[in-house]
C-alpha cells in the first residue's frame, strides 16, 4: 500500500503535472495553495511564490502567468497560495498586518523541510493586490527570506500622507522589479487615491524609494521595439549596486493596461512578463551560503517521536506525530497509509 507523508498537512510527494489544490493549516485555518515542481528537481533549487489579485486564487494566477512552463524549463519550484475571503466577500491579502506574511513564511518552511530549496533564492511576484502583498513582504521581512520581488500592476500605500502608522520598514536589502502600465485603470501610474482605502505612491516614487534604499544607480536603459505597432511600448531602466549586487528594474509600459503583460497569441504586448521576471530572479542570489546553512539538516539525528499528548511512541500511520531532532528542530508529520 502506498504511503504518503504529510508535513503540517502538506503532501511533499507532489507529482509533476499534479499541481493541487493542496492545503496547509495556519492559525487553525485551512489555507489553499497550488504547487508545481519539475521532474527530478534537485535540492538547492530556487522557489517562486506567485500571488493573485483581489478576488483571484492560486489556480487562476497559475493559469494566467504560466510560470509552470518556465519552472520546467529552468528547474525551479513555483507556489501559488490563495488569499482568504475578506469583508468584501472576495479573496484578498492582509497588507495591513502580519497574518499572511506568517502564513507564507510557515508554508515556505514546511516545503523547504521536504525539498531543501536554496534559501538565498526565494522570490515573490504578484499581480494587482498580489503586487501590493509582494511589497508588503519586502517591507516587513526581518530575515532575508526573500531575495527579490517583482510586483506587477500594483502599488505601495502612502502611509505618511494617509496619516497611517507605519507598520514596518525594510531592514534588509532586497532586489525589486517594478512593472506597471501607464494606462492602468486600477493603480494610476502617477499615484492616486483608492476609494475607501487611501493614497498610494506613484510608480516613480516607488522606484526612487527602492533605489535609494538599496543605494542603486542607473546601469542601463533602453526601449523594447513596438513589435505590434499598437503604440504600446516599454521603457526599461535598470539600476544596480555594484558593491552588493542589489538590483532595481523598472518596466514602464507606455499605454499599458491593468493586465499581466503577455505576447501573442494570449496578449498584445512586446514581452512576456513571466519570462522577464524569471530572468530578473535568475540574476539575484547565490547558492554558496545556503549549501552551508542547509547541510546540517541532512546530518541531524532523530531523538524521539511523540504524539499530541506528549507521549513517546514509535512512528505509526494515520496519526499526527511530532518528530524531535538533535538540532532542536521539530516537525509535525502525518503518514497516511
Image (cartoon, grey):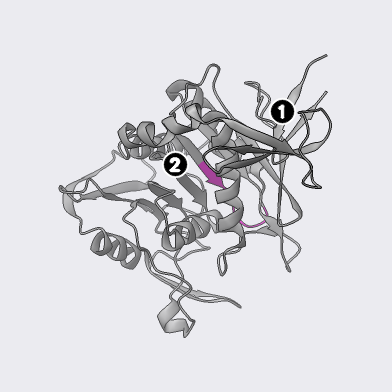
Q: Which residue is mark 2?
A: 122
Using the image, determine if residue 169 lies above or below residue 332: below
Quadrant location, the N terminus: top right
Depth order, front residue of 261/27: 27
Depth order, front residue of 140/233: 140
Depth order, front residue of 140/155: 140
Q: Is residue 63 left or right of residue 183?
A: right
- The location of residue 108, given as percent across then percent down, is 55, 43
The answer to whether residue 303 shows anywhere in this view is yes
Using the image, determine if residue 200 lies above or below residue 260: below
Q: Residue at x 50, y 45 (%)?
A: 260
Q: Residue at x 65, y 59 (%)?
A: 92
Q: In which image quadrant can residue 328 be found?
A: top right
Q: Is residue 176 left or right of residue 308?
A: left
Q: Residue at x 49, y 82 (%)?
A: 164
Q: Which residue is mark 1?
A: 5
Q: Which residues are magenta?
A: 49-55
How crowded pointer 2 is (Cα within 10 Å; few <14, some 14-19, many 20+) is rated as many
Q: Secondary structure at mark 1?
A: strand
Q: Residue at x 77, y 29 (%)?
A: 314
Q: Earlier in the sequence, mark 2 or mark 1?
A: 1
Q: Is residue 76 left or right of residue 211?
A: right
- The alpha-carbon separation of the residues under discs 2 and 1 comes to 24 Å
Callout 2 touching callout 1 (CB < 8 Å):
no
- The location of residue 59, given as percent across then percent down, is 67, 40
Residue 54 magenta: yes
- The location of residue 177, given as percent across then percent down, is 36, 49
Depth order, front residue of 265/180: 180
Amino acid at each position: 500500500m502506498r504511503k504518503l507523508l504529510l508535513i503540517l498537512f502538506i503532501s511533499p510527494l507532489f507529482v509533476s503535472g499534479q499541481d493541487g489544490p493542496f492545503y496547509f493549516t495556519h492559525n487553525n485555518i485551512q489555507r489553499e495553495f497550488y504547487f508545481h515542481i519539475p521532474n527530478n528537481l534537485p535540492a538547492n533549487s530556487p522557489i517562486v511564490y506567485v500571488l493573485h489579485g483581489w478576488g483571484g486564487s492560486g489556480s487562476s494566477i497559475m493559469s494566467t502567468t504560466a510560470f509552470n512552463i518556465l519552472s520546467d524549463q529552468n528547474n525551479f519550484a513555483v507556489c501559488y497560495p490563495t488569499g482568504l475571503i475578506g469583508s468584501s466577500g472576495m479573496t484578498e491579502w492582509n497588507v495591513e498586518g502580519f497574518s499572511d506574511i506568517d502564513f507564507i513564511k510557515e508554508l515556505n518552511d514546511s516545503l523547504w523541510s521536504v525539498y531543501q530549496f536554496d534559501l538565498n533564492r526565494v522570490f515573490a511576484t504578484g499581480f494587482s493586490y498580489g503586487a501590493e502583498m509582494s511589497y508588503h513582504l519586502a517591507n516587513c521581512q526581518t530575515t532575508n527570506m526573500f531575495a527579490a520581488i517583482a510586483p506587477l500592476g500594483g502599488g505601495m500605500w502612502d502611509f505618511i500622507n494617509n496619516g497611517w502608522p507605519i507598520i514596518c520598514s525594510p531592514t534588509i536589502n532586497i532586489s525589486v522589479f517594478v512593472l506597471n502600465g501607464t494606462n492602468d485603470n486600477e493603480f494610476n501610474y502617477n499615484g492616486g487615491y483608492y476609494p475607501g482605502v487611501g493614497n498610494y505612491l506613484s510608480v516613480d516614487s516607488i522606484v526612487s524609494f527602492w533605489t535609494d534604499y538599496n543605494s542603486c544607480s542607473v546601469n542601463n536603459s533602453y526601449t523594447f521595439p513596438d513589435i505590434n505597432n499598437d503604440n504600446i511600448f516599454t521603457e526599461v531602466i535598470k539600476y544596480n549596486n555594484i558593491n552588493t549586487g542589489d538590483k532595481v528594474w523598472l518596466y514602464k509600459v507606455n499605454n499599458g493596461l491593468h493586465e499581466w503583460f503577455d505576447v501573442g497569441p494570449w496578449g498584445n504586448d512586446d514581452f512576456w512578463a513571466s519570462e522577464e521576471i524569471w530572468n530578473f530572479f535568475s540574476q539575484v542570489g547565490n547558492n554558496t551560503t545556503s549549501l552551508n546553512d542547509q547541510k546540517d539538516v541532512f546530518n541531524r539525528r532523530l531523538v524521539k517521536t511523540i504524539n499530541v499528548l506528549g507521549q513517546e511512541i514509535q512512528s505509526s500511520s494515520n496519526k499526527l506525530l511530532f518528530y524531535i531532532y538533535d538540532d532542536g528542530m521539530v516537525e509535525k508529520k502525518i503518514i497516511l497509509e
